[in-house]
Image (cartoon, rainbow, N blue to C red):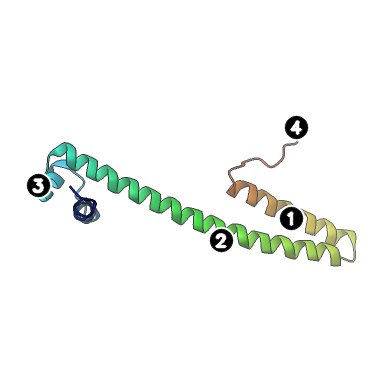
Amino acid sequence: MTIEQREIILAKVEELMARGSYKNVEISKEINCSIPTAQSYKEAIQTRWKLSKNCDYDLARAEIMENLHEVEKGLWEAFKLADNSNARVGSMNALLEVQKQKAFLCGVNKVMSKDS
């Protein structure tokens, strides 16, 4: 079987799955193959869907990180321009929150601990 033929079959399987046909027996009857082969096609489509979702997640995370970076730059500017200590403390607290969000997006759940 060529790559092109396999892709045509996978497209049919994906269409079936998109319509709600997840049973290997149904898929094997529709594309005229064995049940184990239908299972492997189904797994291939599920892997593609999973990778697609991961890609979408990575793009969204990158966009959020970029936005947080812009907020961080603005907070540092506000800190520099602050004319009193309350404004500086407010800027630092906001910067800490931005850092916590960035750490969370990078998979670090705890930025700092009171015990450390």
Residue 58 rendering spot, x and y as whole percentages: 50, 53
Q: Separation of disc 4 and disc 2 at Cα?
A: 33 Å
Q: Residue at x 39, y 53 (%)?
A: 52
Q: Earlier in the sequence, mark 3 or mark 2?
A: 3
Q: Quadrant of the C terminus?
A: top right
Q: Separation of disc 3 and disc 1 at Cα?
A: 60 Å
Residue 43 rendering spot, x and y as whole percentages: 27, 42
Q: Amino acid at mark 4?
A: Asp
Q: Residue at x 61, y 41 (%)?
A: 109
Q: Separation of disc 3 and disc 2 at Cα?
A: 44 Å
Q: Separation of disc 4 and disc 1 at Cα?
A: 21 Å
Q: Which residue is mark 2?
A: 63
- In front of the other: label 3 or label 1? 3
At numbered mark 3, what does the secondary structure look like: helix, strand or loop?
loop
Q: Which residue is mark 3?
A: 32
Q: Which residue is mark 4?
A: 115
Q: Which residue is mark 1?
A: 95
Among the 4 quarters of the image, the one containing residue 67? bottom right
Q: Earlier in the sequence, mark 4 or mark 1?
A: 1
Q: Earlier in the sequence, mark 4 or mark 2?
A: 2
Residue 40 rendering spot, x and y as whole percentages: 23, 40
Q: Amino acid at mark 1?
A: Leu
Q: Earlier in the sequence, mark 3 or mark 1?
A: 3
- In front of the other: label 4 or label 1? 1
Q: Residue at x 68, y 54 (%)?
A: 98
Q: Separation of disc 4 and disc 3 at Cα?
A: 63 Å
Image: 83 above or below 49: below
- In front of the other: label 2 or label 1? 2
Whether residue 82 sits left or right of residue 101 in the image: it is: right
Q: Amino acid at mark 2?
A: Glu
- In front of the other: label 3 or label 2? 3
